[in-house]
Amino acid sequence: MSSPFARSLPSRPDLAQQKKQAKELLQSFASGDAEARARVRAVLPDKQQIALADAQFVLAREYGFASWAALRQHIESKVEASRSPLDRMHHAFARRDAASVRKLFEKHPEFRARINDPLFPFDSPALVATAGDPAMVDVLLDFGADPNRRSGWWAGGFHPLYSATEATADRLIAAGAIPDACAAAHLDRPELLARMIAEDPTRVHERGGDGQMPLHFARSRAVVDMLLAAGADIDARDVDHRSTAAEWMLDHTRGSGRFEIARYLVERGASADIFLAAALGLDDRVRAMLDAKPKLLDLRTGQGDYGEKPPSSYRIYFWTIGDGRSPLDVAAQFDQQETLQTMLEFASPFQKFLLAARRGDEAQAKSMLRESPGLIKSMKQADHRAISDAAWQGNARAVALMSELGFDPRTPGEDSGTALHCAAWQGSVDTVAVLLRRPDARSLVQIRDAHYKATPLGWCFHGSQNGNPRHDHAGASRGRRSTRP
């Protein structure tokens, strides 16, 4: 059934715009708008209530398509056809669209000639950048990718096997990839690793990507035990991030990543700083540390000794925990409640207030402000950064609370961006909306960061190309445009 409310697509259609139109139709229908109800009944006469999928279906019929999927495919094909071959290749790699990559290699021999070039982040060739994707690995090997070509990273190149899965590792090895001790540890192949060590015991100290050693790559207790028995240094640090194997094994939340292997390394004697102890819930160790040095609670990931030390980058917590976290934040983030309570015994009123604000705990933060009204005025610029860090995390509730309490959203955070820059880069529509409700929103959208000299809209565009593709950068950018005079 076609719709009497026929409409035509623009010459350069934008799927994000069609999604917005479907949401607006749904909202208008729900609010009782007469035209919206007529449009829906023209296509779905028996529907008294509709969902978003129904609104999308109605919109597709109005554009002359049998379904929303058909409309989406038409728009995506038009957008793709308008791109240059190089742009199409970039887009195909970003989507991990192996079929499109194959077609482009078949049609454009100039791309095949550059298949081993370091064109991806950290001076990586394509095979290193996609080594965990079986379909992409197959395409790249079929067109001549070198299975032993490492990235050119200064601190130590990454081999394709370092990020391979079991399935892709077998394919790479069949194509000629040669595993080293780091690869054997990552792939959790203790028999292979044992043979290497028997032939050359020094291989427990060899360095791989980022200057990591095999222990950094370990994924099982068996491999940890084997490496330590062979003389591996349990506290050896990589070159780029100056971090131990245990520190590398965290992944933002309790139980994620190689959390249990990190705990096992500490049981085997690995050192643990205040952040690792907080993440693992080492309550007795935390208490002993704070008894000796309460100021440890002032430390932040990504700052001070945990920041950049050129040529090396941030300590690995920047990626395995997050930037700008205090030990209190880490205990809360990893849901180590007993350890958090221990830390709070040593925390100052301001540290407790900052924790409540960062967690979006409105009742606690406001209660503390009533008891100590001067807390906000006592804050240094580094303390105000909490609102930008929360925006980088897409934590709209915390940003809203801190904005209300008086935190300054202009404070530079990640890469010198303000809170709005950070929220825009992440495509966090809710966080952008919180900041754009401020009375000074018009000035916020015009600020250029100190590093790239870009506005929040520029950061939003860059995030859409290089950030999480599942985030709504189009929605965030529309929020930004709504503040224009």
Image (tube, helix red, strand yellow):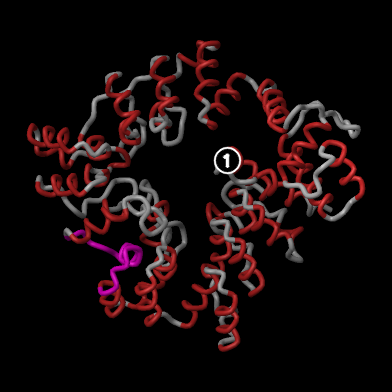
Residue matched to label 1 = 469
State whether residue 53 is above or below residue 301: above
- Neighbours of disc 1 within 10 Å: few (<14), some (14-19), many (20+): some
Q: What is the residue that sits farthest to the left in this orientation?
A: 198
Whether residue 270 is in magenta: the answer is yes
Q: Quadrant of residue 68?
A: top right
Residue at screen point 28% across, 55% down: 260
Q: Quadrant of residue 273?
A: bottom left
Residue 421, position as x, y percentages in the image: 62, 53
Q: Is residue 199 left or right of residue 79?
A: left
Number of numbered markers: 1
Q: Is residue 120 left or right of residue 447?
A: left
Residue 435, position as x, y percentages in the image: 69, 61
Q: Amino acid at mark 1?
A: Pro
Q: Nearer the viewer, residue 460 or 106?
A: 106
Look at the image and give the residue range highlighted in magenta.
269-284
Residue 370, position as x, y percentages in the image: 60, 87
State whether residue 47 is above or below residue 343: above
State whether residue 262 is above or below residue 329: above
Residue at screen point 48% across, 78% down: 352
Q: Quadrant of the N terminus?
A: top right
Q: Is residue 86 left or right of residue 255?
A: right
Secondary structure beneath dot 1 equals loop
Whether residue 96 is in magenta: the answer is no
Residue at screen point 59% across, 37% down: 465
Residue 293, position as x, y percentages in the image: 31, 77
Q: What is the residue that sits farthest to the bottom in this orientation?
A: 371
